[in-house]
Image: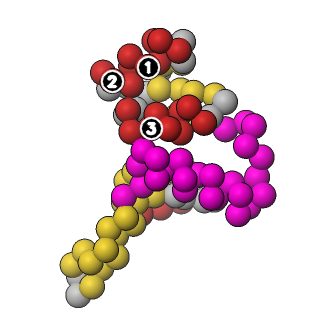
Amino acid sequence: MSTAIDIIAEKVARNLEINHCISSKIELADNFPSNIKIVNGQSKLKELKDFLNKNNLPTDNIYAYGDDISDLPVFMYAKYKIAVNPGRKLKKHTKNRNWNIV
């Protein structure tokens, strides 16, 4: 799951042998962006919940791995939280809640 656009996120997922990728989408019309769907914040959490539900996957062992305050909804939903080089706002949340920081 990434806020990155699909053409980048899906390539990274393939290289890491990740089977599923949820990311922002850009549709092109005549080689120009015509429709952009950004996945972040609450929409990232909705996409995650929809994916789990659609695939009948359990919700009790979710890992959140992120660096930005926009990842907070997913962090709050996840059982395991790992902040990676968090920005100032996310770092404040990690310290207040004793989350892992790498």
Mark identifier at residue 71: 3
Q: Is residue 80 above or below residue 25?
A: above
Which of the marked residues, 1 or 3, is nearer the chain's N terminus? Answer: 3
Could you classify mark 1 by the number of other residues whose Cα lies within 10 Å: few (under 14), some (14-19), or many (20 or more)? some
Residue 17 place in picture, x, y as percent = 60, 55
Q: Amino acid at mark 3?
A: Asp
Label 1: which secondary element:
helix
Question: Mark 1 highlights which residue?
Answer: 93
Q: Position of residue 4 (x, y in %)?
A: 37, 53
Q: CB atoms at circles 2 and 1 under 8 Å apart?
A: yes
Q: Which mark is residue 101?
A: none
Confirm or deny contact between disc 3 and disc 2 (CB under 8 A).
no
Instruction: Report crowding for label 2: few under 14, some 14 to 19, many 20 or more residues within 10 A (C-alpha).
Output: few
- Residue 69: x and y in percent read 38, 32
Magenta span contains residue 53: yes
**Amino acid type at image mark 2:** Lys
Q: Could you tell me if residue 88 is visible in this image?
A: yes
User: Residue drawn at (67%, 38%), measured in percent from left and top?
Assistant: 62
Side of 54 relative to 64 (left or right): right
The mark tally for this picture is 3
Give the vertical position of 82 relative to 99 (above or below): below
Point out the stretch of residues depicted in magenta.
Answer: 38-63
**What residue do we see at 53% from left, 15% from top?**
97
Q: Which mark is residue 89?
A: 2
Please state which of residues 71 and 15 is positioned toward the viewer in this rendering: 71
Image position of 6 with respect to 70: above or below: below
